[in-house]
Structures are given as C-alpha cells and as structure tokens.
C-alpha cells in the first residue's frame, strides 16, 4: 500500500516547482536522439529476424509504424530544440511526455508480446532480450523524467513478466523474476538519481538567487557611491569619472566636449533664513529642474553644496552653449516655494571646452571654474564661456597673489579717506578709510582686486590689521566729532578670536570705540550668519558701531537687517546712477530710508555724483551721504585742508538745482 502511494507520488509531475520541471526537460532534451536510436535499432533487428517466421503485418508493418512514430517524434524534437522553454509551459509539456512514454511502452510491449509466439525458442529469447535491453536503455535515457521512466518500467515489467510466467517454462519464469528484480533495482536507482538531480537544481537556484542578491547589493553600493542622495543626480565622484572617460575618449579618437559649472546665487540665504530643511528642498527642486533639461549627451551632477556640474558630451558651438546656459539659468531663476514662502535664487554657469580650454581634466575644470568666477563677479545669473580674457585674469590673479604674499605690507599699503557728510547740517560727520596698495612691480593695484585675492588667501587678516592700525592712527588726529568708517572682510569676522583682535587694536589705539564704525558687506555676513552675528555683537558690546555696506547688491532681506546688530545701513551706489530719472530706483531708496527710520538705524547714501541725485535723495529724507560730489577719496595729508574748507559752506553745491 505504502509502495503504491509512493509510486503514485513518483508518477506525479512537480507542478509546484516549474523551474525543476524545466531543468528536467532541458536535461532530457540532450538524450532524445539516443533514446530513438536505441528504439529504432533494436526494433529493426528483431523485425529482421522475424521476417520469415512471423506474418508481414507483425514483422514489417507494425514495426515500420513504430519506427515512423519514432522518426516523427525525433524530427519534432529537432525542430523545437532551440525554442525557449517557458516556466508556464514546462509542466504541461512534461505531462505530455509522461503520457507519450506510457503510450510507447504499451505499443512496443504489445508488438513484442504479439511477436513472441512466432519463431523458435532462440527467436523468442531474442524478443525477451530485446525487451530487457531496450527497456534498460530507454529508462536510462528517461532518467531525468522520473515519472516517465517509472511508468515505462512498470508497463513493460508488469506486462512482460506476467506473460513470461504464464508461458510456464522455467527458463522464462526465471527470466521474469530476473526482469522484475532488475526493474525494482532500476526504479530505486531512478529515484536516487532524481533526488540528487532535484537537489542540484535547488542548490543552483539558491546560488543564482544569492548571486543576484550580491549583484543587487553591489549595484546599490555603486548607486550610493555615485549618486547624490539628496537630488538623485550623479555626484562629484561620478562627474569626475565621466569627465575622465570623456577626456580619454576625446584624446584617443579626437573630438571634444564641454564642461559647465553652475553655482546658485542666494542659496545660502535660503538656508540661513528658512533653515536647512528648506535649503534641502530647494536643492531637490534645483535637481528636478536640471533633470528636465537633460537630453541625450547632456548630463547634470551635483558637485556639493550649491554647486552643480554639466557635461555636454559632444562639442557644441558657442551659441548653442550660451542657449543651453540661458535655459538653465532661466529654469533656476523661477521662484522656489519653501516653507510657505517664495525664495528667489539664480544660477550662474561657467563653460569650458575640451581640449581648447584645457587638455587635462583638472585644467578644463579649473577653466570652467574661472569662467564661473567671472560670471559670479560681473554677470550673475548668466552663462559665461571661458575665453583667453579669463586666462589673462587667472594669470594676473596668480601674479597679484604672489606679489601680495611677498609684499612689505607696512610700506606698500596706505589709506585714502572719503568724507561722509550730513546734507542738512552740511558738515562732515565721518570718513571712510579705503585701502590702497602701491607695489614696486605692479604699481597701484585696485582695492577690489587685491582685497578679493587677499580674501581668498587669508592674507586679508594681515592686511586688515595693518590698515586698521594706520586708519586709527589718522583718526586719532581728527576732530572728536568725526568717526572712522573701516571696511572689514568676511574672514575678519569669521571667528570670535578675530573679532576680539579687532577690538584689542581699537582699544590700544586710544580712539574711543564709539568713533569707530566697522563696515561689512551683506555677502560677508551671509557666509556664516551665526558667526557673523556673534562677532558683530562682540564688536558692538565693545562700543564700536557696525554698518551694513553696499545694501541692495546681494540677497539681503529685511530679516537680515533685523537679526543683526547694525547701527547703519549704506545704500549701494548702484542705485544712485539713475535715482533722479528712474522711479523704481527712487522707490527702492525711499523704502530703505523708511526702513532705517522705522528700525531706528542710520542710513548713508553712497555714490552721489551729481547735484540732481543729491537733491532727490535729500527730498526722500536722506541725511548722511557720501560720493564724488562731495569729495573723492583723499590722502590722509589732505584731510585737514578739506575739513578746513568744509567749515565754509562747501556743500551749497548739493542744494543747487
Ligand atoms: P565700498 O566700501 O563700498 O567703498 C566705496 C567705494 O565706492 C570706493 O571705491 C569709493 O572710491 C567708491 N566711490 C565713492 N563715491 C563714489 C561715487 O560717487 N561714484 C563712484 N563711482 N564711486 C564712488 P574703492 O576705494 O575702489 O573701494 C572699492 C571697494 O573695495 C570698497 O567698496 C570696499 O568694499 C573694498 N575696500 C576698500 N578698502 C578696503 C579695505 O581696507 N578693506 C576691505 N575689506 N575692503 C576694502
Ligand atoms: Mg565701504
Ligand atoms: Mg559701499
């Protein structure tokens, strides 16, 4: 009973495991030609020896029909041998094969049993031998299809052994017993083989699954190592890998490509005002906007912070680059919605072409950076293509850096002073100290140039100290009611220790701190807002004043002014150029003046050049003014004479129409 149950189980097709079934069929496919070869050769041999003893339908037609069946099946296999076997169709195909094996077993057994009575005992033994050898051969060929092999074995053994026993001849009975025992042994071998086979298939499947898992993990690792998690854009590492690959390709096969560097203007302010979470949202939005502009051959990457990169795989004409750059800048300048507010940002791009701008990855990147630098300095929110003019700038910049490093700062640096006047009282109220550098080799270097370079190299710390000493020494000689306004750089307030050092210099100078006002630009404040606030508070506590210089040129918002301890706001001179003709400029100046009035801050209007401008700002409510109209910056030695002259009504000119 148990045996029967087991047999039934073994005859079943493993429907639940289609992969195993497919492997069975694939392994069996390789044995099919052998199987039909055994069947055909053995059948022909038996048919041939019975040609004379058996009737034609048994010795010719029946075996011919069986042979034809074998050939048809063989051809069928040949035609379908390259057809992919799907998991869905495998169980049905195996079931079909099991039925076919049963059918073949019945057909061949019937033929040989019908043939058995004809011929001599030799020929009868040949039939028995034929059945035994053919059975063993076929069962081995069907080894992978356990169900088919066992079905065939059962049909042949049961039919033949019964038949042989029924003949009553001891030799045939012995043969029947022998056949049955060998059949059982064969069944056992098939069972063991099948177990091993399915075990191997399972092990292989597990191996494949674990390989797949490892591959997935390694893909994930690769993704994490090359993708920026915040924006989902390729990261800096991936950008440089592509840059290297493109440069190798261009050097090998000729051609070239373009590298673009994008820097966001105003991002820091978003971070400071709305917090880092909002900053992250803005960066994600930037990533999305850039992705929308990606097209075949154009890749974007996030290089870190608010810096992004573009690779244009195929060299583009300058007009196309400018056009792409403008589209990028335009997309980045659309308003961003963060934390219920709307933030305004812009992006500047520097482009450099390989190999024209540089023949190494580092060079071309640096050139793109140089173009970006130029863009940020003078053409924010626009694309700039690296040119030889920028090259000259870079050379000049490194020359100035070198000279500045080796300069005798005490001897070469000096100051000019520009008066700050009160339009109502028409008196000078203070003087702004402006640094000057006269170098033996370079001649006079503009403050914008050397200050910017000094800021990059941290030489500014030494420069500030030298100039502050000199400025205070001069201020000590001025009438007591005049204050000194002194420009600071971002680095001067980037640590509390630096701020303390400035205070110490003021205290040691003998000039009362209330007569000293430190000017700081908004861009300097936004570098590190918290530290700036801390340093400025220290300076204020020491009794000095602090002014926000060049207000209106950056991204300052009212919240900045409000959150930092400023005493004075200096409206940038760029608003003065058309204040008397342009109502928008006039409105801006008016609103800043009103803001200062409301917040109790002093306001200095910078850059007044004409009487008409002075008239307009005076009418808008300005009191403190500065500009060429009153005086250009002058040497310290000229101050006394200037102040003397100013005691006479020198500012009448400002009141003239
Ligand atoms: P700033 O602090 O805004 O200084 C005012 C600049 O505007 C000065 O240029 C001054 O000469 C110029 N200016 C004044 N009135 C007029 C006017 O009516 N029309 C025009 N077109 N310009 C006028 P300068 O001396 O070339 O300085 C440029 C900038 O360099 C300064 O801008 C300041 O940011 C920086 N700087 C100058 N000296 C120092 C310094 O000692 N330390 C630091 N950190 N920066 C300095
Ligand atoms: Mg200034
Ligand atoms: Mg200024």
Image: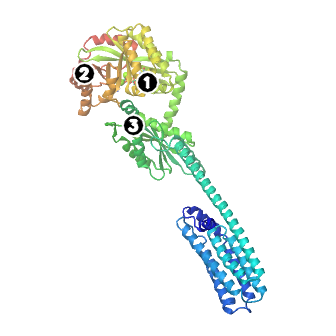
**Nearer-N-terminus badge (1/3):** 3
Q: Percent from the top left, x then y, of residue 442? A: 50, 25
Which residue is identified by label 3? 380
Which residue is identified by label 1? 490
- Marks 3/2: CA distance? 31 Å
Q: Residue at x 26, y 15 (%)?
A: 650
- Marks 1/3: CA distance? 20 Å
Label 1 Cα crowd, 10 Å radius (few <14 / some 14-19 / many 20+): some
The C terminus appears in which quarter of the rendering?
top left
Label 3 Cα crowd, 10 Å radius (few <14 / some 14-19 / many 20+): many
Q: Percent from the top left, x then y, of residue 470? A: 44, 13
**Nearer-N-terminus badge (2/1):** 1
Q: Is residue 654 above or below residue 128?
A: above
Disc 1 on helix, strand or loop? helix
**Nearer-N-terminus badge (3/2):** 3
- Marks 2/1: CA distance? 27 Å
Which tag is nearer the camera, tag 1 or tag 3?
1
Compared across the picture, whether 456 is left or right of 165 comes to: left
Q: Is residue 193 above or below residue 451?
A: below
Cβ atoms at labels 3 and 2 below 8 Å apart: no
Instruction: Mark yes or no: residue 634 visible.
Output: no
Q: Percent from the top left, x then y, of residue 536? A: 39, 19
Which residue is identified by label 2? 597
**Front one among 625 and 465:** 465
């Amino acid at each position: 009973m148990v045996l029967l149950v087991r047999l039934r189980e073994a005859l079943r097709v493993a429907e639940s495991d289609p992969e195993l079934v497919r492997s069975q069929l694939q392994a069996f496919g390789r044995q099919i030609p052998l199987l039909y070869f055994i069947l055909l050769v053995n059948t022909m041999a038996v048919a041939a020896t019975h040609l004379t003893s058996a009737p034609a339908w048994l010795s010719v037609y029946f075996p011919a029909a069986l042979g034809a069946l074998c050939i048809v099946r063989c051809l069928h296999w040949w035609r379908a041998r390259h057809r992919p076997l799907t998991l869905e169709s495998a169980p049905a195909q195996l079931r079909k094969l099991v039925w076919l094996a049963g059918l073949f077993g019945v057909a061949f057994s019937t033929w040989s049993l019908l043939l058995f009575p004809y011929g001599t005992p030799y020929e009868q033994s040949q039939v028995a031998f034929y059945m035994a050898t053919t059975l063993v051969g076929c069962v081995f060929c069907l080894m992978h299809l356990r169900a088919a092999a066992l079905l065939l074995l059962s049909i042949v053994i049961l039919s033949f052994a019964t038949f042989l026993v029924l003949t009553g001849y001891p030799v045939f009975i012995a043969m029947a017993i022998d056949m049955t025992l060998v059949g059982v042994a064969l069944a056992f071998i098939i069972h063991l083989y099948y177990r091993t086979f399915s075990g191997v298939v399972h092990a292989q499947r597990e191996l494949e699954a674990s390989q797949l898992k490892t591959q997935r993990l390694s893909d994930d690792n690769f993704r994490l190592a090359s993708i920026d998690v915040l924006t989902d854009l390729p990261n800096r590492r991936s950008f440089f890998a592509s840059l290297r690959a493109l440069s190798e390709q261009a050097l090998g096969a000729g051609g070239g490509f373009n590298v673009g560097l994008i820097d966001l203007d105003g991002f820091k302010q978003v971070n400071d005002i709305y917090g880092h979470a909002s900053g992250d949202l803005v960066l994600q939005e930037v990533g999305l906007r850039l992705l929308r502009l990606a097209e075949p051959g154009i890749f974007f990457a996030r290089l870190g912070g608010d810096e992004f990169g573009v690779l244009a795989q195929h060299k583009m004409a300058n007009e196309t680059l400018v056009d792409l750059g403008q589209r990028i800048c335009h997309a980045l300048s659309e308003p961003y919605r963060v934390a219920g507010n709307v933030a305004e940002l812009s992006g500047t791009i520097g482009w450099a072409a390989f190999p024209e701008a540089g023949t190494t990855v580092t060079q071309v990147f640096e050139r793109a950076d140089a173009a970006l630098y130029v863009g940020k300095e003078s053409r924010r929110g626009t694309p700039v293509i690296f040119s030889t003019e920028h090259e000259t700038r870079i050379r000049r910049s490194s020359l100035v850096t070198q000279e500045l490093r080796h300069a005798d700062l005490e001897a070469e640096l000096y100051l000019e002073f520009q008066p700050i006047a009160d339009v109502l009282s028409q008196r000078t109220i203070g003087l702004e100290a402006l640094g000057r550098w006269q170098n033996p080799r370079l001649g006079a270097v503009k403050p914008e140039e050397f200050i910017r370079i000094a800021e990059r190299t941290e030489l500014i710390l030494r420069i500030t100290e030298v100039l502050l000493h000199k400025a205070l020494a001069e201020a000590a000689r001025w009438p007591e009611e005049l204050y000194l306004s002194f420009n600071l750089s971002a680095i001067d307030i980037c640590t509390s220790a630096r701020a303390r050092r400035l205070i110490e210099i003021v205290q040691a100078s003998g000039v009362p701190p209330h007569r000293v006002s430190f000017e700081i630009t908004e861009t300097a404040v936004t570098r590190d807002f918290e530290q700036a606030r801390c340093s400025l508070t220290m300076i204020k506590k020491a009794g000095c004043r602090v002014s926000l210089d060049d207000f209106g040129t950056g991204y300052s918002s009212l919240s900045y002014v409000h959150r930092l301890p400023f005493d004075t706001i200096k409206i940038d001179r760029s608003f003065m150029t058309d204040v008397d003709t342009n109502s928008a400029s006039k409105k801006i100046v008016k609103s800043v003046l009103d803001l200062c009035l409301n917040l109790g801050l002093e306001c200095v209007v910078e850059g007044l050049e004409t009487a008409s401008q002075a008239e307009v700002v005076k009418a808008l409510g300005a009191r403190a003014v500065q500009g060429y109209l009153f005086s250009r910056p002058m040497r310290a030695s000229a101050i006394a004479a200037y102040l003397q002259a100013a005691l006479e009504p020198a500012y009448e000119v400002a009141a003239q129409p």
